[in-house]
């Protein structure tokens, strides 16, 4: 039987087998049209809290509003929100990183300006 120090380093099955959505998929869910659908879902008895208390950023359902509000104060939620503040890469940025086109990064007066020049 392993000691407590050995048990702490194992990853839970929930995290390992059900990784959840990627950050770019959550960005899609945060668009106003999809966000309104996710926040105003029909009652689903299979979900916690009948599917009425959902955190879009963390893609989690909660039992009641109090639990959801407590979750919004946690480090897990704040880190996820901080991660989601970064703008996901566009298709042009991905192509430029792969060598298809030209990528210019210019900084001017504490403002980052990204210019893309593609050779089509």
Image (cartoon, helix red, strand yellow):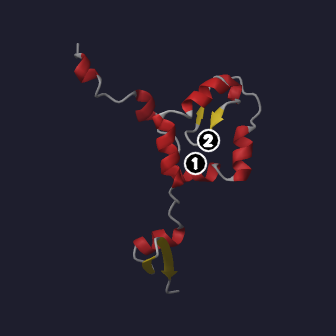
How many C-alpha atoms fall within 10 Å of the one at disc 1: few (<14), some, or many (≥20)? some
Residue at horizontal 48 percent and vertical 72 percent from the top: 112
Q: Quadrant of the N terminus?
A: top left
The residue labelled by disc 1 is: 26
Q: Percent position (x, y) of residue 116?
A: 50, 79
Residue 36: in sight, yes or no? yes
Is residue 44 toward the left or the right of residue 6 in the image? right
Give the CA separation, mark 1 to mark 2: 7 Å
How many C-alpha atoms fall within 10 Å of the one at disc 2: few (<14), some, or many (≥20)? some
* 14 vs 23: above or below: above
The residue labelled by disc 2 is: 56
Q: Percent position (x, y) of residue 82?
A: 49, 48
Q: Earlier in the sequence, mark 1 or mark 2?
A: 1
Q: Which mark is residue 77?
A: none
Residue found farthest to the bottom: 119
Q: Are marks 1 and 2 in contact (CB under 8 Å)?
A: yes
Can you tell which quarter of the image residue 3 is in? top left
Q: Secondary structure at mark 1?
A: helix
Residue at horizontal 43 percent and vertical 33 percent from the top: 15
Can you tell which quarter of the image residue 60 is in? top right
């Amino acid at each position: 039987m392993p000691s407590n120090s050995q048990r702490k380093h194992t990853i839970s099955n929930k995290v390992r087998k059900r990784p959840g959505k990627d950050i770019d998929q959550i960005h899609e869910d945060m668009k106003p049209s999809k966000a309104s659908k996710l926040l105003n879902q029909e009652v689903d008895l299979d979900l916690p809290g009948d599917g009425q208390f959902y955190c879009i950023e963390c893609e989690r359902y909660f039992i009641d509003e109090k639990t959801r509000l407590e979750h919004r104060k946690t480090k897990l939620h704040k880190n996820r929100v901080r991660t989601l503040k970064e703008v996901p890469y566009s298709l042009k940025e991905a192509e430029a990183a792969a060598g298809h086109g030209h990528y210019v990064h210019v900084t001017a007066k504490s403002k980052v300006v990204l210019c893309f020049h593609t050779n089509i």
